Image (cartoon, helix red, strand yellow):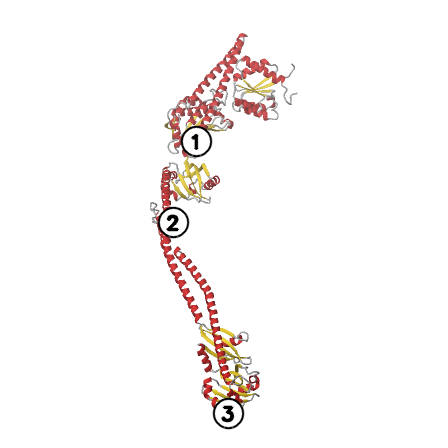
């Protein structure tokens, strides 16, 4: 509801209430007093009628007085004046005096003369017998104690109500003795009532008291009237008001009800006044209302509407440089100034915000670190180009179609990650394995914070991802190198101890026998000298051999020719050529497989390996009548494994590893230092191969080894590793 | 000293050393029988009466074992372990006599309950001195456990 409508409604309602109140008050006050005034007037009018009636009666009494205190009458009753009737009691007398009846009685009460006259028809009528009867029943009218006595009043006759007066008949000098009574009567008939009405200028009517009243208001009046409250006022409808008065007869009994009716002019005037007042108030109110609305419109509503429209249009368009203009120097212009000031500061902060937004946006976009914003339920909200690139997607929209949890290598990891963030508010360098579009794993460290809404509930997460693939690789490489180095160190340590131990053994022998030789020579025990010397010689040659093998071993791995692609069969051929004499001497049969693959090796060293292995086989043939050596290969799990197999004395399983130890000799009496297999193992390992023995005592021996192979089953890793070897 | 002959089992793969030690021991102590075996396997066969020593009379229970560590076939440490784990043999004092000064070897030997660890000295005099002291200590002065009557 607009302000205008509200103002109109409230003011209108208030006005309406005020008018209603005013009307109620003035109705009660004004009309109450008008009604009272009206009643008083009516009462006065009733009283006027009553006094007119009394006046009538007193006129009758006065007339009676003239006739009763007259010698002629006095004489007439005394029977002396015979001509009295003829002279005085003429019809004209009745008409002139407006009397309907004259009765002359003597002292004893007997009627001397009586005459009744119908004033309307102007003719004599018989004296009503009802009156005679009434008089005979009640003699008070005939008995006047003094000459000054006079009785007036009303009697109710079947013919109608009669005003009556009675006085003693006396002399003109007002002296007695009283000769009788003179009674005069006048009917209170319609004519008389009309006369009274004319006299009082009022509308009159008379009713018998005892008659059952035909009108409701009359009935009410009859009920209300009594001796104590002889006047009763009652409005009859809106238009007129009636006044009632009780009239008693001569004996004091209620006889007639007088009624006057008059228009309620005062009351109606009051009503009209009230109506005018109301009209005036309503008119003033309406004018006031219209004026108020007009003023409100001009001074408040229209500037307010303008302001409203203006501010909303600026708000809708976001055109902050626009301003509100209101002239004048009232509250609205102040408000407009305030709005303008607010707009100015808003514009300023908006531009500052836009600037910083732009700054951070650029930072976000161009950051080389992948930056992300995701919702709590695992949808993308934003990501920069680095993030898109990290996951290997073509575009942001491409990436945004993927659920965030699906970018974890294990989808469950996200829940765990989120739990960490929410528990601690943020995580720094949290390790997570993510997944590229093509499924490649990416080891990362994620630094992120939880985004919360105003109530503190988590709505999402944002942070940066660090791809540590390179670092991880470098770490693994470092670890591998460290392990390798540790292994080499341990090997070196073992090597040094082995050397020192092995060298110490002939040294102890040489030293001890040198001392012994000296002693034997001093004691001239010449038979022992040769033995002593032999021990010394053996020890020295042993030392020489050890030194030579040690050097050889150290050269292996240090001095290498660049690897080349050689058919394995060529290596076998070279080795067999070197060993032709020994094989022939031992009578050993050699079986060589065909279609060997090509290997990528240091040719010289590999020939050395084969020579060594074949030599060992020849050496440990034992008493085998048909010594045989097989050289071949087979493919196990896509890996080519070469072997040299003999049918010699074999080797106990407990020795299978030991034989590769430096200077380990299975047979103490055999020639050599026991470095041969150690050197073989080292050459194979330099080629990233493995070597092991399968054998049982008495059942021959097989030495297996792997090498980097070309062609089918080629292992590229091995090739690279060999190339990279020193 | 009226004593019956003592037996020393010398486990030594190097011929020169074996000859030298035998010779010195024969010089420094009387009534001693020296049994020489050349590798770990043979030593175990001797001690546990198996292989070529299967017959009881082939091998006498030694009163002292001199043990080299780096032996062919069965390593010296394994021989030591076997002796010390055997209920019947563990009372025999085993003296490790080796040219290895490796700390690792020393620790392993004592862990395997070697009774003593000696490094072969350089020079005949020193060697004689060592073996004299050794034989006196282990064969004369030391009172072994149990079945020595």
Badge 2 marks a residue whose secondary structure is helix
Q: Position of residue A335 (x, y in %)?
A: 38, 48
Q: Is residue A89 visible?
A: no
What residue would you read off at disc 2? A331
Identify which residue, A517 or A377, lies in the foreground: A377
Badge 1 marks a residue whose secondary structure is helix
Quick check: A525 above or below A543? above
Badge 3 marks a residue whose secondary structure is loop
The numbered mark at residue A475 is: 1
Whether the residues at callouts 2 and 3 have beta carbons within 8 Å, the answer is no
Determine if marks 2 and 3 fall on one subunit: yes
The numbered mark at residue A82 is: 3
Identify which residue, A101 or B116, lies in the foreground: A101
Give the Cα distance between marks 3 and 1: 180 Å
Q: Residue at x 41, y 36 (%)?
A: A466
Quick check: A312 above or below A184? above
């Amino acid at each position: 509801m607009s302000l205008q409508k509200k103002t109109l409604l409230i003011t209108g309602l208030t006005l309406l209430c005020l008018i209603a109140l005013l009307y109620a008050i003035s109705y009660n006050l004004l009309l109450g007093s008008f009604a009272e005034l009206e009643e008083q007037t009516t009462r006065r009018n009733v009283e006027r009628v009553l006094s007119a009636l009394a006046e009538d009666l007193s006129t009758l009494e006065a007339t009676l007085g003239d006739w009763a205190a007259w010698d002629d009458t006095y004489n007439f009753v005394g029977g002396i004046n015979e001509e009295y009737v003829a002279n005085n009691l003429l019809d004209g007398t009745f008409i002139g005096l407006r009397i309907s009846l004259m009765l002359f009685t003597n002292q004893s009460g007997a009627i001397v003369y009586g005459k009744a006259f119908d004033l309307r028809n102007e003719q004599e009528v018989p004296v009503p017998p009802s009156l005679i009867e009434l008089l005979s029943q009640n003699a008070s009218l005939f008995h006047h104690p003094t000459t000054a006595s006079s009785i007036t009043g009303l009697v109710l006759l079947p013919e109608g109500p009669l005003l009556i007066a009675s006085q003693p008949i006396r002399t003109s000098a007002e002296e007695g003795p009283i000769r009788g009574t003179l009674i005069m009567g006048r009917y209170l008939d319609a004519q008389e009532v009309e006369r009274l009405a004319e006299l009082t200028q009022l509308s009159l009517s008379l009713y018998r008291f005892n008659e059952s009243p035909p009108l409701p208001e009359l009935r009410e009046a009859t009920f209300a009237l009594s001796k104590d409250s002889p006047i009763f006022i009652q409005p009859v409808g809106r238009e007129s008001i009636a006044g009632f008065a009780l009239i008693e007869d001569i004996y004091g009994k209620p006889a007639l009800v007088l009624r006057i009716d008059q228009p309620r002019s005062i009351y109606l005037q009051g009503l009209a006044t009230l109506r005018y007042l109301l009209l005036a108030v309503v008119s003033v109110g309406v004018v006031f209302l219209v004026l108020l609305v007009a003023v409100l419109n001009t001074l408040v509503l229209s500037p307010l509407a303008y302001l409203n429209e203006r501010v909303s249009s600026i708000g809708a368009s976001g055109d902050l440089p626009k301003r509100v203009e209101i002239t004048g120097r009232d509250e609205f212009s102040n408000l407009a100034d305030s709005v303008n000031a607010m707009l100015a500061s808003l514009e300023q902060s908006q531009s500052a915000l836009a600037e910083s937004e732009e700054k951070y946006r650029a930072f976000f976009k161009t950051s080389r670190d992948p930056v992300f914003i995701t919702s709590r339920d695992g949808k993308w909200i934003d990501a920069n180009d680095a993030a898109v690139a990290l996951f290997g997607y073509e575009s942001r929209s491409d990436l945004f179609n993927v659920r965030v949890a699906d970018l974890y290598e294990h989808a469950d990891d996200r829940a765990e990650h989120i739990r960490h963030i929410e528990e601690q508010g943020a995580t720094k360098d949290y390790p997570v394995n993510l997944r590229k579009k093509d499924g490649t794993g990416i080891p990362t460290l994620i630094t992120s914070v939880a985004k919360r809404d105003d109530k503190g509930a988590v709505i999402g997460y944002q942070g940066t991802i660090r791809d540590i693939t390179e670092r991880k690789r470098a770490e693994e490489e470092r670890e591998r190198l460290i392990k390798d180095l540790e292994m080499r160190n341990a090997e070196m340590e073992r090597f040094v101890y082995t050397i020192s131990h092995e060298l110490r053994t002939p040294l102890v022998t040489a030293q001890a026998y040198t001392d012994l030789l000296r002693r034997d020579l001093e004691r001239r025990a010449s038979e022992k000298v040769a033995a002593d010397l032999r021990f010394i010689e053996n020890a020295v040659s042993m030392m020489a051999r050890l030194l030579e093998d040690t050097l050889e071993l150290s050269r292996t791995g240090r001095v290498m020719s660049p690897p080349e692609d050689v058919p394995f069969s060529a290596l076998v051929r070279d080795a067999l050529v070197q060993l032709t004499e020994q094989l022939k001497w031992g009578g050993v049969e050699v079986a060589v497989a065909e279609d060997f693959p090509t290997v990528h090796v240091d040719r010289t060293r590999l020939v050395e390996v084969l020579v060594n292995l074949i030599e060992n086989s020849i050496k440990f043939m034992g008493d085998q009548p048909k010594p045989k050596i097989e050289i071949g290969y087979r493919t196990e799990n896509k890996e080519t494994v070469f072997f040299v197999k003999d049918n010699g004395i074999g080797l106990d399983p407990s020795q299978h590893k030991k034989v590769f130890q430096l200077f380990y000799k299975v047979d103490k009496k055999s020639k050599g230092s026991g470095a041969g297999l150690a050197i073989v193992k080292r050459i194979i390992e330099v080629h990233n191969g493995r070597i092991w023995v399968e054998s049982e005592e008495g059942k021959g021996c097989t030495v297996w080894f792997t090498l980097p192979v070309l062609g089918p089953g080629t292992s590229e890793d091995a090739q690279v590793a060999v190339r990279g070897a020193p | 000293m009226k004593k019956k002959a003592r037996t020393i089992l010398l486990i030594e793969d190097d011929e020169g050393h074996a000859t030298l030690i035998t010779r010195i021991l024969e010089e420094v102590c009387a009534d001693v029988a020296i049994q020489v075996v050349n590798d770990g396997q043979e030593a175990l066969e001797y001690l546990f009466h198996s292989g070529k020593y299967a017959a009881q009379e082939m091998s006498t229970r030694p009163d002292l074992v001199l043990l080299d560590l780096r032996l062919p076939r069965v390593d010296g440490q394994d021989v030591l372990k076997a002796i010390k784990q055997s209920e019947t043999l563990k009372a025999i004092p085993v003296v490790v006599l080796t040219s290895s000064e490796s700390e690792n070897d020393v620790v392993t030997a004592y862990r395997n309950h070697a009774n003593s660890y000696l490094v072969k000295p350089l020079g005949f005099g020193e060697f004689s001195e060592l073996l004299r002291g050794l034989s006196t200590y282990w064969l004369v002065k030391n009172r072994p456990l149990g079945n020595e009557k």
